Amino acid sequence: MWILFAFGSAFFAGVTAILAKCGIEKTDSTVATAIRTIVVLVFAWIMAFMTTPDSSIESISIKTWTFLILSGFATGASWLCYFHALQKGDINKVVPIDKSSTVLTMILAMIFLGEGISLSGLIAIILIGVGIFLMIEKKETVEKTSEENHQWIAYALLSALFASLTSILGKIGIEGIDSNLGTAIRTFVVLIMSWLIVFVTGKKKRLKGIQKKELLFIIVSGIATGASWLCYYKALQDGPASVVVPIDKLSIIVTIVFSRIAFNEHLTRKASIGLAAIIIGTLIIALPSITAA
């Protein structure tokens, strides 16, 4: 059953990127992140109250609280970097870099969670790495200054790093508690973090200037994010992180398809080969577990 949740997470995550891109064309990405977090928080706590006994919060250990909070900070940092990168760069470039967190997560899972990497897993990592490299190659149809390129690339790389830390810390943090409750607690941490940044950076005034159309996309993207999170952490609680994370990263397929429809972004031949390598590498990791299930 956890495999179904993993694929559900991939679908909703893929849709999230498209909806978010539509919502931050003129809206500041940090402000948009803070607004989205409110939507995700409501969504997460509704599910937590529906599935979690009242006594569950009181029984959470200090260790679990610590890792949930750290995971929340990592998630917030990843979100802020990711949506800033989306605002500066093309979806077909930003998303592949963000998905490079797959490789790092698998390595961290081996080191900190004791999840081994087989020969096929090593081959998969290489394929995913090569695929990402091919997909982030510059497109001739897009002209940007060197400074702008460096900005979105840096934010996309930071997003991938924090996303990897989120997965590992989240895996440790949801041991022994309901996954929905863990998601809700983490989201509350992200909410505090994102709104503090909005106030500290003086971006509170920009809230009044948000267009209704973009606000709608931001809210809907928050709902999609909430659905993705709930599926993801349910899968992560029951399945191995080294398999759940790669399946979740198949969201890149959904994103690429919808980016073609919504923004008319096309893949070059090399980028298409890269996408195929990422998909093959992911399936190499995931198929044994899918077959066993």
Image (cartoon, rainbow, N blue to C red):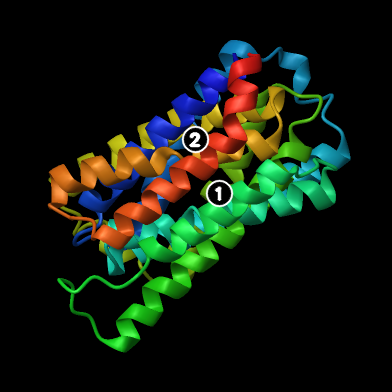
Can residue 180 be seen from the camera position used here? no
Q: x%, y% of residue 24?
A: 25, 56
Quadrant housing the N terminus: top right
Instruction: Indicate whether 259 appears above or below 12.
Output: below
Q: Which residue is mark 2?
A: 41
Q: Is residue 22 above or below residue 155?
A: above
Crowd band around label 1 with a 10 angstrom C-alpha radius: few (<14), some (14–19), many (20+): many
In the picture, residue 244 is in which quadrant? Answer: top right
**Label number found at residue 28:** none
- Front residue of 85/48: it is 85
Which numbered disc covers residue 190? 1
In percent of width and height, residue 266 lies at: 18, 55
Is 188 placed left or right of 137 in the picture?
right
**Residue flagged by tag 1: what amino acid is it?**
Val
C-beta proximity under 8 Å, tags 2 and 1: yes
Q: From the image, which quarter does the C terminus lie in?
A: top right
Question: Of marks 2 and 1, which one's residue comes earlier in the chain?
Answer: 2
Q: Residue furthest bottom?
A: 146
Q: Residue at x 59, y 47 (%)?
A: 124
Residue at left 33%, top 46%? 17
Residue 212, x across and y down, in percent:
15, 45
